[in-house]
Amino acid sequence: MPEFNPPQTEAEFEKNFEQIKPLMNDTEAFYESSRCLYCYDAPCIKACPTGIDIPTFIRQINNKNTIGSAKTIYDSNYFGYACGKVCPTEVLCEGACVYNHQNVKPIEIGRLQSFATSHAINSGKQLYKTGEATGKKVAIIGAGPAGISCACELRLAGIAVDIFEAKQKPSGLTVYGVAPYKITNEEALAEMTYLEKQFGFKINYNQPVNSKEDIDKLEKNYSAIFIATGLGETSKLKIPGEQLENCFGAVEFVEKLRMQHQNVKVPSTVVVLGGGNTAMDAASESARIGEKEAYHV
């Protein structure tokens, strides 16, 4: 008997794809933040790819300065909420927590990070002031993490920004390529709306830039162009049968699942080629949407 029944409604889909890092409430965040030792050498900061001052933002949560905590996070990472839920914290910041050396559960840094930034998002609190207008204008191709982060930095410097996005929604892989049990579409898009209001950049949707003529036009109208086109499609295996029905890349499968939810159907038996994080997600998602057997190769 499979662990999950195929979801037929949105409520059943949400149940099958329940968040693995649910948001903390105020009490949970207070007690969890009180466990931080505020290490002098802060190994968690060194393990964070974006260098967030983790002990400081945790101390601010504990001192009930939650908005200040969110500011500390966003100063280093404009995708603070999403990364708190999506990043493999167990092998990064939490993996470096000194509690691991004492056989004690490490501090739940990711959940604390999402807790603080969610407060800022929900409050609509203005954390940043854009710079004085310089008269310069930059075109950004792609509204994923790189494109949005670039836009925020440019607006702080007083440079106007237009983003050109080929898809219907922003945030790139956060919406289109991350397993639904890590972050919901609503959560990812709420952070994007918050940043757009904070920094005042403009996103033009359904406007791909895919020809020399498109680039030439941008070059005439903008001071500079920043290309943030992301990872692209899954690499091809170049083997016979790869183009057959029901044979597709894991990222493409995740995108379809994120957009169509319970309307995505999978066969009773699924074969996953690969054993990385994306492959594991594809197998788990297949089980949650209705497959009964999965094989890894």
Image: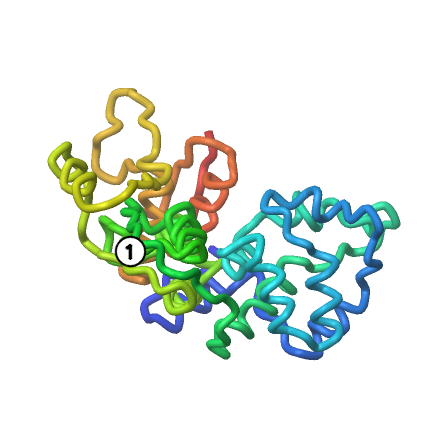
Q: How far across and down, in percent of the image, does residue 22 sit?
A: 57, 67
What is the image's colouring? Answer: rainbow
User: In the rendered image, is residue 240 in sight?
Assistant: yes
Residue 160 found in image quarter:
bottom left
Q: Horizontally, is 285 left or right of 77 in the view? A: left
The residue under the point 50% across, 42% down is 280
Residue 249 location (% of width, % of height) = 33, 37
The answer to whether residue 287 is left or right of residue 248 is right
**Foreground: 138 or 281?**
138
Q: In this view, does 276 lie above or below 75?
A: above
Residue 214 falls left or right of residue 82: left
Front residue of 77 and 225? 225
Please, what is the three-letter code of the amino acid marked with disc 1? Answer: Val
**For numbered disc 1, what is the local secondary structure?**
loop
Q: In this view, does 31 lie above or below 157?
A: below
> Residue at the spot x=60%, y=43% of the render?
49
Q: Mark 1, residues whose alpha carbon is within 10 Å: few (<14), some, or many (≥20)?
A: some
Identity of the residue drawn at 39% across and 48% down: 173
Which residue corresponds to the image point at 28% horizontal and 52% vertical from the top-left?
A: 163
Which residue does the numbered mark 1 point to in the structure image? Answer: 264
Q: Total label count?
A: 1
- When the figure is inspected, residue 283 is found, relative to residue 129, above or below; the finding is above
Extreme residue toward the top, this view: 239
